[in-house]
Amino acid sequence: MERLIHLLIFPLVIATANAVEINLPTSAEMLQSIDSVINEAVNKSKIPGGVIWLEREGAKYHKAYGHQSLLPVKRVMKNNSIFDAASLTKVMATAPSIMILIEQGRIALDDPVRKHLPEFIGGNKNKVTIKQLLTHTSGLRPVLPKKPTWHGYDKAIKLGISLELTELPGKKFRYSDVNFILLG
């Protein structure tokens, strides 16, 4: 759940920044509102921290919030903290790419995965849809197994396709990297 909140707050901050006309630095009320939302999330332990960077017409707003890490040692977030963008690619690259394919009519949310990956068969896999991959309700496990060792796109897809479902499709939310490997 914590990871889901992390995935949701980043696009929310970005969407807020893009949806509201920003006249930095004179838009203090808007910046105060963003500060308030992020500080509340940090104070309620919904996120450990974050960094915001807004730019428009040469004006910049850059601020760090909360902590970069809580364990094993608490480290205060800095403006130059580096983040692993791994899971952000799900919401910032893969999901938008799927939506573009939908707009182009090349794929549909209700398409069974097997329509695009014919080897994705067996058990209840024939019921898994693109939408269920996107919403982490496919029934697939969270990660690919470490053994056998694998490297590269083709082997990851082949291994993802071979996995059995751990839940019935559409019945349970379970964050799954495998879903997005298959969407990729």
Image: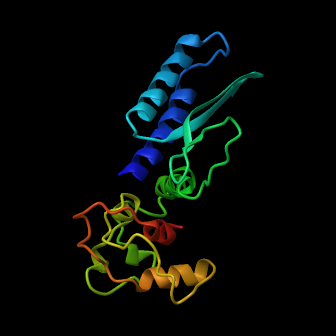
Q: Where in the figure is residue 25, as x and y percent of width and height?
A: 67, 14
Q: In this rendering, does residue 118 appear at all?
A: no
Total numbered labels placed on residues in the image: 0
Residue at the image point whose x is 78% and y is 22% from the top: 58
Q: How is the image coloured?
A: rainbow
Q: Where in the figure is residue 69, as x and y percent of width and height?
A: 55, 47
Residue at the image point whose x is 66% and y is 36% from the top: 78
Q: Where in the figure is residue 72, as x and y percent of width and height?
A: 53, 54
Q: Would residue 135 be found to the left or right of residue 25 on screen? A: left
Q: Would residue 92 be found to the left or right of residue 110 on screen? A: right
Residue at the image point whose x is 46% and y is 46% from the top: 6
Q: Nearer the viewer, residue 179 or 44?
A: 44
Position of 69 relative to 33 (above/below): below
Q: Nearer the viewer, residue 104 or 170?
A: 170
Residue at the image point whose x is 49% and y is 55% from the top: 95
Q: Quadrant of residue 28?
A: top right
Q: Quadrant of residue 75?
A: top right
Residue pushed farthest top?
26
The image quadrant where one finds the C terminus is bottom right
Q: Where in the figure is residue 160, as x and y percent of width and height?
A: 46, 79
Q: Would residue 27 be found to the left or right of residue 48 on screen? A: right
Residue pushed farthest right?
58
Q: In this rendering, does residue 126 appear at all?
A: yes
Position of 127 relative to 19 (above/below): below
